[in-house]
Image (cartoon, grey):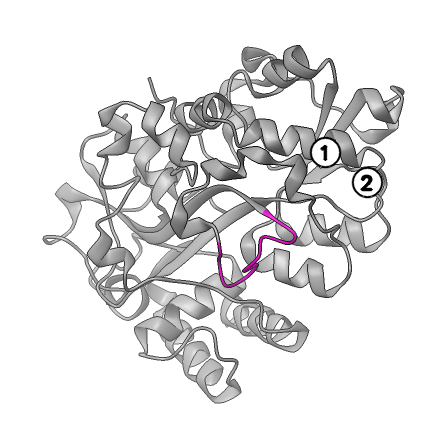
Amino acid sequence: MLIPQSRRGFLSGLGAAAVGITVTGLGGCHNPAANQVNFYTWDTYVGRNTLSGFEKQSGVHVSMSLYSSNDELFAKLRGGNPGYDVVVPSHDFVQRMAKADLLTPLDHAKIPNMANIAPQFQHPAFDPERKYSMPYTWLVLGIGYRKSKVDGVPDSWKWVLDSDRYKGRIALLSDAPDLCRLAEIYLGKNPNVFDRATLKEVEALLIRQKPNVATFHDDNGQDLLLGGDVDIVIEYNGDIAQVIREDKDLAFVVPREGSLIQSDQLCIPVGAPNPDGAHAFINYLLSAEAGADIARTIAYPTPNAAALRAMDAAYRDNPVIFPPQAALAKCQYAQYLGEDAYRAFQDVITRVRAA
């Protein structure tokens, strides 16, 4: 059975004790490095048996600490790795962190389960040789909506970015780079080209749309939709798939203009105290059993072909978890475009929200 949990809300919704997890800060860790792996990840983004299964198999304890954003992770490591062995940045932050010399190259000989990675995830543009990262999950941004409150299928970004039809019932994603890039896609622009003139168009569009927007959400759009606070929202497919299990009046669509694919990655930061343990833990996470446990628990799409084969048809054939190929063909990975672009995205959304 799939348990409906948000990537960032799983811990509060289910409770760490329910999955046998102990969450600690590094200050409370006293085990020798060889007997412990320090795992820094989202709150909580693991299967019911992820940590206990690895500990049983290897005899190595996993101490898990949590962060709430890629920016928090980046800042923590840029200040000097305080002792983390495995981290889970989103794919564009793999590029950003690699350019900042924050990641250790992986030893593929120590990760034989990388053979389980589905072909389409083996050589991504952000890390073509898988030098720094292994895939953990993938997801796509789209529109979640309440069927009884909208007219047909809202299969265009227009309905959230450029229309007053659902005034006061719209929630936009607060993540600045993603929101700017989705607006660029709607405007027919390339989201992987940094162009200040285009960003001015994006800013004007979003300021014009702001009176129609109920809120800018921090990846809890599925909860706003489920609770009836909004009727239409920009959100990840996995999050909407989770709440659809509770409310069949909810649905998800990838807009016809295309969208952004995101993939969270397993990486070893520079200065990891237990790199051998980190490699062993990543290898375990890429096993069919661990991958299926993770997918079954958090209900996100898995890039693990062996794990996918172990899942039931309700998961494999779910068109929200796995949107149609025709829709995915119009989607692309966001690339890291440099610090100037990153700051420009942030500045645009700051001005939009202050308008």
Give the residue type at disc 1.
Ala
* 79 vs 162, nearest the viewer: 79
Dominant secondary structure of the residues highlighted in magenta in the image: loop
* Residue to which mark 1 is pinned: 278
The quadrant holding residue 131 is bottom right
Q: Secondary structure at mark 1?
A: helix
User: Which contiguous range is marked in magenta?
Assistant: 123-133
Q: How many marks?
A: 2
* Residue to which mark 2 is pinned: 272
How busy is the neighbourhood of tag 2: few (under 14 within 10 Å), some, or many (20 plus)? Answer: many
Q: CA distance from mark 2 to mark 1?
A: 8 Å
* 21 vs 164, nearest the viewer: 21
Is residue 217 something one can see in this rendering? Answer: no
Answer whether labels 2 and 1 touch (C-beta < 8 Å). Answer: yes
The quadrant holding residue 211 is bottom left
Q: Residue furthest bottom?
A: 197
Is residue 223 something one can see in this rendering? Answer: yes
Q: Is residue 234 left or right of residue 15?
A: left
Q: Is residue 203 left or right of residue 328?
A: right
Give the residue type at disc 2.
Ala
**Residue at x 58%, y 67% (from the top left corner):** 336
